Structures are given as structure tokens and as C-alpha cells.
Image (spheres, rainbow, N blue to C red):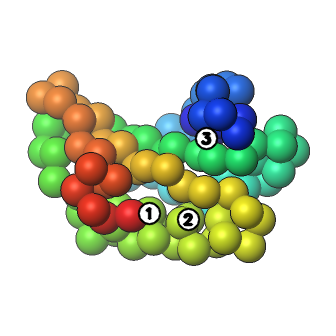
């Protein structure tokens, strides 16, 4: 999700669609869209088809990488959300951002 200053959603963009075991989240594309749309904040999300809400080490590393890269553009990563049929996991709520 790409957000304006007041955290109003500008739009939601489906950046990547995965296969059976994963997908690629390219931070350069995430920020290219944010810059083109003058977004101030972003929220990233992905699903875990397995139903497991626990973030993987890769999920945690991706969130930290995107958060750090955003500092160069003054674009803040507000949250990274994992979605399953069982519920949601919010990185910000768990102190992982």
C-alpha cells in the first residue's frame, strides 16, 4: 500500500505473484513506485498459504532491508503484514520494525 502524508491510501499495488514456494519482492520496484507517486509511507504485505503466521527469517530480513532503504528517500515502512486464512501478523505490533 502506498500512502499519503496523513496515511490515507493512495493505492494498493500487487507487485509480485509467487509460485508454490515463494515470490520475489524487489525493493527497487517498491521504491520506484513510491517515488513516482509521491508516497510518503508504505505498508508491504504477503500471504503464507501454509496458514503459518510466524515470519520466516527471510521475511524479517526483507522488512529490515526495505525499512533501511526507505531512509534514503524519506519514505517510511509503517508495517509488514503476513496474511493467512487463520489471521494476520503485524511486524509493527510485534516490535520487529
Which of 40/56 is in front?
40
- Residue at screen point 74% across, 73% down: 72
Residue 55 vs 53, above or below: the answer is below
Relative height, residue 41 to residue 61 (above, below): above
Q: Is residue 44 visible?
A: yes
Q: Position of residue 51 (x, y in %)?
A: 14, 37
Residue to which mark 1 is pinned: 63
Earlier along the polypeptide chain: callout 1 or callout 3? 3
Mark 1, secondary structure of its residue: helix
- The residue indicated by pointer 2 is 66
Disc 3 secondary structure class:
loop
The span from disc 2 to disc 1 (Cα, nearest Å) is 5 Å
Residue at 65% x, 34% y: name it. 6
Residue under the point 34% across and 53% down: 92
Q: Is residue 19 visible?
A: no
- Compared with residue 26, is residue 72 higher up or lower down, i.e. above or below? below
Circle 3 sits on which residue? 15
Q: Are marks 3 and 2 in contact (CB under 8 Å)?
A: no
User: What is the C-alpha distance between the residues marked 3 and 2?
Assistant: 14 Å
Mark 1 nearby-residue class (10 Å; few <14, some 14–19, many ≥20): many
- Callout 2–callout 1 Cβ contact below 8 Å: yes
Q: Nearer the viewer, residue 90 or 26?
A: 90
**Quadrant in the picture for the C terminus:** bottom left
Choose mark 3 or mark 2, whichever is in front: 2
Q: Nearer the viewer, mark 1 or mark 3?
A: 1
Q: Is residue 1 left or right of residue 23?
A: right
Q: Is residue 88 left or right of residue 22?
A: left
Q: Quadrant of residue 81?
A: top left
Mark 2 surroundings: few (<14), some (14-19) or many (≥20) residues within 10 A? many
Amino acid at each position: 500500500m502506498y500512502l499519503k502524508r496523513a496515511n490515507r491510501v493512495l493505492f494498493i499495488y500487487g507487485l509480485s505473484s509467487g509460485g508454490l514456494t515463494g515470490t520475489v519482492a524487489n525493493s527497487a520496484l517498491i521504491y520506484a513506485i513510491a517515488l513516482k507517486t509521491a508516497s510518503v509511507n508504505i505498508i508491504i504485505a504477503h500471504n503464507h498459504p501454509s496458514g503459518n503466521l510466524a515470519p520466516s527469517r527471510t521475511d524479517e530480513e526483507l522488512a529490515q532491508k526495505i525499512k533501511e532503504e526507505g531512509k534514503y528517500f524519506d519514505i517510511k515502512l509503517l508495517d509488514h503484514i503476513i496474511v493467512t486464512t487463520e489471521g494476520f501478523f503485524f511486524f509493527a505490533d510485534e516490535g520487529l520494525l
